[in-house]
């Protein structure tokens, strides 16, 4: 491994979580020096899981009001707008405007985050057009919160895929990985 990206939720998502669940923000990014990797030569990157805010072009790309050079594009229920029927238009507009900084499209098959409304084939086609990987999300697969039919479509048709942990702890990083490998092996993808 030569580099690893630590990606956290955007300010829009954290504002929602703070209000709904009284989550505190105690890991500040303004002091990047404290995050420097002092253990080996692996380059440590900081990205943001940007949230689509509406069906136009608007996305939140900041963590603690700091912009990130690269983003993972996402939509989270209740963080974005109320009209989930326009999610396809929102993704299309956001990708067309911001494709140069999008490193991945997050949890495209997640049941809780609007994905029941997404035209997955149109999203894959758009991601392929702009050479953007789609994510296979360990966490949602482990928690049975993945639309399996759509996941198969993503695996079969996307030009690029990232297998990503969505881990919020080291335990999740280790344990959730087993589930995605098992899924890929059982379905003869690997």
Image (tube, rainbow, N blue to C red):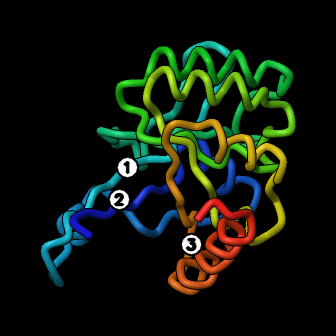
Q: Residue at x 79, y 70 (%)?
A: 143
| x and y percentages locating residue 73 in the rendered image | 54, 38
Is residue 50 shown to the viewer in this render?
no
Helix, strand or loop at mark 1: strand
| x and y percentages locating residue 72 in the rendered image | 48, 43
Q: Give yes or no for contact between labels 2 and 1 (Cβ–Cβ under 8 Å).
A: yes
Helix, strand or loop at mark 3: loop
Quadrant position of the C terminus in the picture: bottom right
* Residue position for label 2: 5
Helix, strand or loop at mark 2: strand
* Residue position for label 1: 47
Looking at the image, is mark 2 or mark 3 nearer the viewer? 2
* Mark 2 to mark 1 CA distance (whole Å): 6 Å
Mark closer to the chain start, 1 or 3? 1
In-image side of 138 versus 58 (left or right): right
Assess disc 2: are there few (<14), some (14-19) or many (≥20) residues with their C-alpha within 10 Å of its C-alpha. Answer: few
Is residue 186 shown to the viewer in this render?
yes
* Mark 2 to mark 3 CA distance (whole Å): 14 Å
Q: Quadrant of residue 137?
A: bottom right
| x and y percentages locating residue 83 in the rendered image | 84, 23
Position of residue 97 relative to residue 14, above or below, is above
Q: Which mark is residue 168?
A: 3
Quadrant position of the N terminus in the picture: bottom left
| x and y percentages locating residue 106 in the rendered image | 59, 46
């Amino acid at each position: 491994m030569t580099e690893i990206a630590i990606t956290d939720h955007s300010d829009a998502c954290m504002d929602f979580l703070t209000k709904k669940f009284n989550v505190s923000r105690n890991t500040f990014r303004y002091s990047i020096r404290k995050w420097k990797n002092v253990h080996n030569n692996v380059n440590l990157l900081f990205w943001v899981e940007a949230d689509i805010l509406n069906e136009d072009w608007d996305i939140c790309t900041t963590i603690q009001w700091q912009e990130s050079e690269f983003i993972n594009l996402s939509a989270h229920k209740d963080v974005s707008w109320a009209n989930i029927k326009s999610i396809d238009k929102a993704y299309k507009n956001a990708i067309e405007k911001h494709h140069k900084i999008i490193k991945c499209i997050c949890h495209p098959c997640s049941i809780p985050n609007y994905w029941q409304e997404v035209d997955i084939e149109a999203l894959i086609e758009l991601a392929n057009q702009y050479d953007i990987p789609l994510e296979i999300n360990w966490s949602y697969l482990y928690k049975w919160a993945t639309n399996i039919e759509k996941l198969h479509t993503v695996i079969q048709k996307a030009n690029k895929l990232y297998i990503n942990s969505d881990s919020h702890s080291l335990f999740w990083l280790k344990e959730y990985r087993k589930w995605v490998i098992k899924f890929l092996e059982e379905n003869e993808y690997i």
